Amino acid sequence: MKHLAPMAARFTRSHQGYQHPAKLDAWEKAVMGPEAEAMRWPGGSISGSDDGWDDCDE
Amino acid sequence: MSTVAIITLAGDLHARVIRRQLQEVHGVEVAVVASDTLSAAGGLTWSNVAGPAPTLPTEDGGVLDVADLDLVWWRRCHGRPTVPDAVTDPQMRKLVVKDNRAGLRGLLLAGFTGTWISDPYATERAQNKILQLSVARRLGLTVPRTLVSTDPAAVRDFARAHGGTVIAKTMTGLLGTSLEAGRVTLESLRDDDEITVSATVYQEEVPGTDHLRVMVFGDAVHAARIRSGELDWRLAGDMEVEPVAIDERLADRLRRVTVRLGLRMGVFDVKLRPDGEPVFLEVNPQGQFLFVEGMSDMPLGEAFAQFVVDELARVHRRVPA
């Protein structure tokens, strides 16, 4: 069977794709302390992604 | 004393920072309600008979009396809610999520009489990119020439008319997945099925390396310039962020877009063409802004806290928006 995906799937990455500049990393750790790591998307920033906040699925 | 509720997802950095700022600097009581961990938390109650007051569970295990609230920051209400593993039927798991979501929303819609940042229905409506682009253009902002379509002939014609390469991006988004904007060429638009499968936003490319992230908090406008050679700065390793003053005419138009969409706040993405013309790309009704503070030292946490305090003063004076 042919596998189809929306056009945007051409440009899809996991949040591993997000850059996480050292300056932002330091700020997040300073603000959140040890909790910062637990709050983080895999590989990404915890203060910078707008993606999918309206995502409705469980 | 004023009481504020932040409705968001569990472990939200923005909620933690703003709560701390409001409590420690402004003496405002803040409760955080995690909209994605309502299942099995208990504490959600509403009744139309004498007895229990409407309540919601707080993230830290307490219970919030909705009648005490002056302001609700409606920040995140979807996400991926937790459901106990013991609920095994997929349909019933969906029902758990939907019923908790409806309970949260209904309880606030019926029992909360303060001010919203921003109204839940306005927030959902304002998320639509077609509506955003239409409102922005109507209010005098420059917007990219855009086609939203599932029609292969229309998409190819649009790409041809724009030099054979256009930007493609999604109408919405997915939690946990980066759906960046990307370039598509006419040569790559051969598969009709790929075009017809879902509505996609096709736009002319706005040239340049300077982007603006503009935070409209009520009447206050805070802007940062994000400089990056990448089409989508979220993926840029070379990102430079610094505060900038923007033209008052642009600031006023962004305020008017926010108001026209029924919002009290908006986080705008604007791109600056090489000739200096600002081009509206989109507005995030509940966009992230603290990464800008982290990257530029702009005091946006305090700016947002002050915005909340100003909104509370408006509630207490009963001044209409």
Image (tube, rainbow, N blue to C red):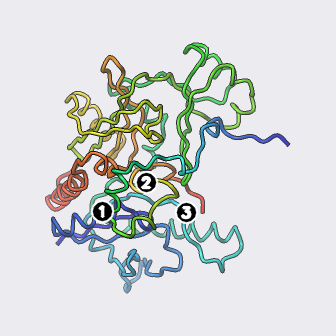
In the displayed structure, would residue B59 be above or below residue B217?
A: below
Place of residue B27 in the rendered image (x, y in percent of width and height, measured from the top left)? 16, 69
Q: Neighbour class for label 1 at 10 Å: few (<14), some, many (≥20)? A: few
Please tell me in which quadrant of the rendered image residue B216 appears. Answer: top left
Place of residue B250 in the rendered image (x, y in percent of width and height, measured from the top left)? 26, 29
Q: Is residue B211 left or right of residue B90?
A: left
Q: Is residue B3 left or right of residue A6?
A: left
Q: Amino acid at mark 3?
A: Arg
In the displayed structure, would residue B161 be above or below residue B272?
A: above
Q: Amino acid at mark 1?
A: Ala
To the question of a shared chain for discs 3 and 1, the answer is no
Dot 1 or dot 2, earlier in sequence: 1
Identity of the residue drawn at 38% across and 57% down = B75
| Image marks 2 and 3: residues in contact by CB distance under 8 Å | no
> Quick one: quadrant of the N terminus of chain B?
bottom left
Q: Nearer the viewer, residue B85 or A47?
A: A47
Res. B80 mark:
3
| Host chain of mark 1 | A
Place of residue B283 in the rendered image (x, y in percent of width and height, measured from the top left)? 39, 40
| Host chain of mark 2 | A
Res. A30 mark:
1
Disc 1 versus disc 2: distance between alpha carbons? 14 Å
| Host chain of mark 3 | B
